[in-house]
Image (tube, grey):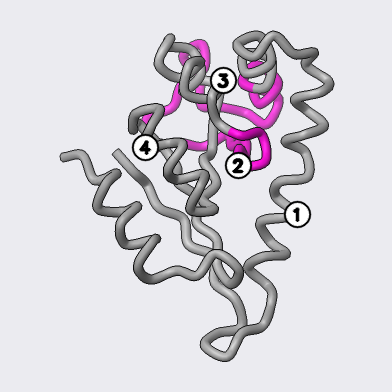
Amino acid sequence: MRSVLKVLDMVKRHLPQDRSAVVLRCFTGSRSEARRAAALGCYISVNAQMIRPEHGRTLFADLPLNRIVTETVGPFSQVDGRPPEPADVRAAVGAIAGARNLPKEAVTGAIHTNPQSLLCTCLQPTSLTQGALETVHVY
Protein backbone atom coordinates (compact mmCIF):
# COMPACT_ATOMS: atom_id res chain seq x y z
CA MET A 1 0.00 0.00 0.00
CA ARG A 2 1.43 3.36 -0.99
CA SER A 3 1.32 5.92 1.77
CA VAL A 4 3.47 8.77 0.48
CA LEU A 5 0.65 11.26 -0.14
CA LYS A 6 -1.00 10.55 3.23
CA VAL A 7 2.29 10.95 5.09
CA LEU A 8 3.15 14.21 3.30
CA ASP A 9 -0.33 15.58 3.97
CA MET A 10 0.12 14.78 7.67
CA VAL A 11 3.54 16.43 7.73
CA LYS A 12 2.07 19.56 6.17
CA ARG A 13 -0.86 19.70 8.60
CA HIS A 14 0.85 18.77 11.86
CA LEU A 15 4.59 19.45 11.83
CA PRO A 16 5.89 23.02 11.73
CA GLN A 17 9.08 23.08 9.67
CA ASP A 18 10.98 25.29 12.08
CA ARG A 19 10.40 23.00 15.06
CA SER A 20 10.46 19.48 13.73
CA ALA A 21 12.09 17.27 11.16
CA VAL A 22 11.07 14.11 9.37
CA VAL A 23 13.35 11.53 7.83
CA LEU A 24 11.60 9.47 5.17
CA ARG A 25 13.27 6.07 4.97
CA CYS A 26 12.84 3.45 2.27
CA PHE A 27 11.21 6.10 0.10
CA THR A 28 9.65 4.66 -3.04
CA GLY A 29 7.63 7.69 -4.07
CA SER A 30 7.81 9.59 -7.32
CA ARG A 31 10.11 12.48 -8.19
CA SER A 32 7.28 14.97 -7.65
CA GLU A 33 6.49 13.42 -4.25
CA ALA A 34 10.18 13.65 -3.31
CA ARG A 35 10.26 17.32 -4.34
CA ARG A 36 7.14 17.96 -2.25
CA ALA A 37 8.72 16.19 0.73
CA ALA A 38 11.85 18.35 0.39
CA ALA A 39 9.72 21.51 0.13
CA LEU A 40 8.02 20.48 3.39
CA GLY A 41 11.45 20.23 5.03
CA CYS A 42 11.67 16.43 5.03
CA TYR A 43 14.93 14.58 4.64
CA ILE A 44 15.05 11.46 2.51
CA SER A 45 17.55 8.77 3.37
CA VAL A 46 19.46 6.80 0.77
CA ASN A 47 21.44 3.60 0.90
CA ALA A 48 23.46 1.76 -1.71
CA GLN A 49 20.59 -0.51 -2.74
CA MET A 50 18.12 2.34 -3.26
CA ILE A 51 20.39 4.14 -5.72
CA ARG A 52 21.04 1.13 -7.97
CA PRO A 53 17.81 1.18 -10.02
CA GLU A 54 17.26 3.96 -12.55
CA HIS A 55 14.32 5.24 -10.48
CA GLY A 56 16.60 5.74 -7.47
CA ARG A 57 19.31 7.54 -9.44
CA THR A 58 16.72 9.82 -11.07
CA LEU A 59 14.99 10.53 -7.76
CA PHE A 60 18.19 11.50 -5.96
CA ALA A 61 19.51 13.43 -8.95
CA ASP A 62 16.52 15.76 -8.59
CA LEU A 63 16.42 16.09 -4.82
CA PRO A 64 18.13 19.07 -3.18
CA LEU A 65 21.41 17.91 -1.64
CA ASN A 66 20.50 19.54 1.68
CA ARG A 67 17.56 17.10 2.02
CA ILE A 68 19.54 13.86 1.61
CA VAL A 69 20.91 11.76 4.47
CA THR A 70 22.77 8.50 4.01
CA GLU A 71 22.04 5.27 5.81
CA THR A 72 23.27 1.71 5.89
CA VAL A 73 20.15 -0.01 7.14
CA GLY A 74 16.93 -0.98 5.51
CA PRO A 75 14.31 -3.63 6.02
CA PHE A 76 15.27 -5.51 2.87
CA SER A 77 18.69 -4.11 2.03
CA GLN A 78 21.48 -6.29 0.73
CA VAL A 79 24.77 -5.27 -0.86
CA ASP A 80 26.41 -8.05 -2.82
CA GLY A 81 24.44 -10.63 -0.80
CA ARG A 82 25.37 -9.26 2.62
CA PRO A 83 23.86 -6.71 5.02
CA PRO A 84 24.93 -3.12 4.31
CA GLU A 85 27.96 -1.64 6.04
CA PRO A 86 28.94 2.00 6.69
CA ALA A 87 31.49 1.84 3.88
CA ASP A 88 28.63 1.24 1.43
CA VAL A 89 27.57 4.87 1.81
CA ARG A 90 30.38 5.77 -0.58
CA ALA A 91 28.65 3.84 -3.39
CA ALA A 92 25.40 5.71 -2.83
CA VAL A 93 27.14 9.09 -2.76
CA GLY A 94 29.13 8.17 -5.87
CA ALA A 95 25.94 7.22 -7.71
CA ILE A 96 24.27 10.51 -6.74
CA ALA A 97 27.34 12.41 -7.93
CA GLY A 98 27.31 10.51 -11.22
CA ALA A 99 23.60 11.17 -11.75
CA ARG A 100 24.19 14.89 -11.18
CA ASN A 101 27.44 15.10 -13.15
CA LEU A 102 29.17 16.47 -10.07
CA PRO A 103 32.46 15.49 -8.43
CA LYS A 104 31.95 12.94 -5.67
CA GLU A 105 33.72 15.25 -3.22
CA ALA A 106 31.19 18.04 -3.87
CA VAL A 107 28.26 15.73 -3.12
CA THR A 108 30.02 14.28 -0.07
CA GLY A 109 30.66 17.77 1.29
CA ALA A 110 27.08 18.88 0.71
CA ILE A 111 25.51 15.79 2.29
CA HIS A 112 28.01 15.56 5.15
CA THR A 113 26.45 18.41 7.16
CA ASN A 114 22.84 17.25 6.81
CA PRO A 115 22.70 15.00 9.90
CA GLN A 116 23.95 17.88 12.04
CA SER A 117 21.36 20.24 10.54
CA LEU A 118 18.69 17.64 11.14
CA LEU A 119 19.62 17.24 14.80
CA CYS A 120 19.89 20.98 15.36
CA THR A 121 16.36 21.44 14.05
CA CYS A 122 15.04 18.70 16.30
CA LEU A 123 16.82 19.83 19.43
CA GLN A 124 15.54 23.40 19.43
CA PRO A 125 13.23 23.83 22.45
CA THR A 126 9.65 24.75 21.67
CA SER A 127 6.54 25.49 23.68
CA LEU A 128 5.12 22.09 22.71
CA THR A 129 8.12 19.82 23.05
CA GLN A 130 11.81 19.72 23.67
CA GLY A 131 12.28 18.67 20.04
CA ALA A 132 11.04 15.75 18.07
CA LEU A 133 12.73 13.45 15.64
CA GLU A 134 10.49 11.06 13.77
CA THR A 135 11.62 8.40 11.33
CA VAL A 136 8.99 7.25 8.88
CA HIS A 137 9.19 4.31 6.52
CA VAL A 138 7.34 5.38 3.38
CA TYR A 139 6.44 2.73 0.81
The residue singled out by tag 1 in the image is 116
Q: Which residues, given as a range, are shown in magenta? A: 64-92
Image quarter of the C terminus:
top left
| Lower sequence index among marks 1 and 2 | 2
**Residue 57 appears at what percent x and percent y?**
51, 15
In the image, residue 17 lies in the stretch drawn in magenta: no
Foreground tag (1 vs 3)? 3
| Lower sequence index among marks 3 and 4 | 4
In the image, residue 87 lies in the stretch drawn in magenta: yes
Tell me: 98 left or right of 58. Answer: right
Q: Nearer the viewer, residue 98 or 38?
A: 38
Residue type at the position of mark 4? Glu
The residue singled out by tag 3 in the image is 61
**Residue 114 appears at what percent x and percent y?**
71, 46
| Lower sequence index among marks 4 and 1 | 4
| Other-residue count near label 2 (Cα within 10 Å), few / some / many at <14 / 14–19 / ≥20 | many
Whether pointer 2 and pointer 4 mark residues with C-beta atoms closer than 8 Å, the reply is no
Residue 67 is labelled as 2
Image quarter of the N terminus:
top left
